[in-house]
Image (cartoon, rainbow, N blue to C red):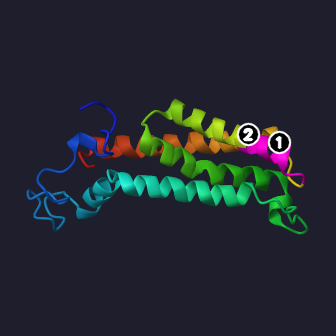
Amino acid sequence: MGSEPTGNGLVNGGSSGNSPVSSESGGDGRNGSSTLPRLIGVALGCRPLRIACTIALALVIGVIVFDPSPPDTSGSIFSIPPVEFAANIVMFLPVGAVARWWRPSVWRNVLVGLVCTVIIESVQGLFLPHRVADIRDIVANTSGALIGSVVCWAIAGTLRRRGRP
């Protein structure tokens, strides 16, 4: 196999046999194998789960960024610019992770984060009078997508070197 997970999200073609737990290990975690990583690999290869997670993430972010009411910044920790910047990074970490779940290309996933952010900021600036489009949000959100995708890339590489899904 290549250096990236296969199309179903599994590394090295998935598990051997019909079960998510290889018969070689007995399924009880002996012989250096663990059931949990194999089950995670099977879950990651589940297309309906991938679709559901993508929709859930889009809904959560949509509720946060498209709320038409004026933001309540009185006494909120999010009114502090560095905290707001960090919160935007954290909000887009899962975007990079979920984008990588669909396509194992860090730069393509960063582009997905950038395009989503530009759309969000455009809608906020054009259609939501109490929201403000801000270039810092574009930088923070795109950074979050980058970090999320790179972290998943690193985890996948570590698991691949260990021979696990």
Give the alpha-carbon distance from disc 1 to disc 2, as whole Å.
Answer: 7 Å
Residue 123 is covered by the magenta coloring: yes
Magenta span covers which residues? 120-129
Residue 80 sits in which quadrant?
A: bottom right
Element carrying mark 2 = helix
| Pointers 1 and 2 in contact (C-beta within 8 Å) | yes
Q: Quadrant of the image for the N terminus?
A: top left
- At 73% across and 54% down in the image, what residue appears? 65
Q: Residues within 10 Å of mark 2 (few under 14, many from 20)?
A: many
Location of mark 2 (residue): 138
The answer to whether residue 100 is left or right of residue 113 is left
Q: Please provide percent x and percent y for residue 15.
A: 18, 51
Residue 26 sits in which quadrant?
A: bottom left
Element carrying mark 1 = loop
Q: Is residue 128 above or below residue 5?
A: below
Q: Please provide percent x and percent y for residue 157.
A: 36, 40
Kind of residue at badge 2: Ile
Kindly identify which numbered label has been placed on residue 134. 1
Q: Residues within 10 Å of mark 1 (few under 14, many from 20)?
A: few
Residue 113 is covered by the magenta coloring: no
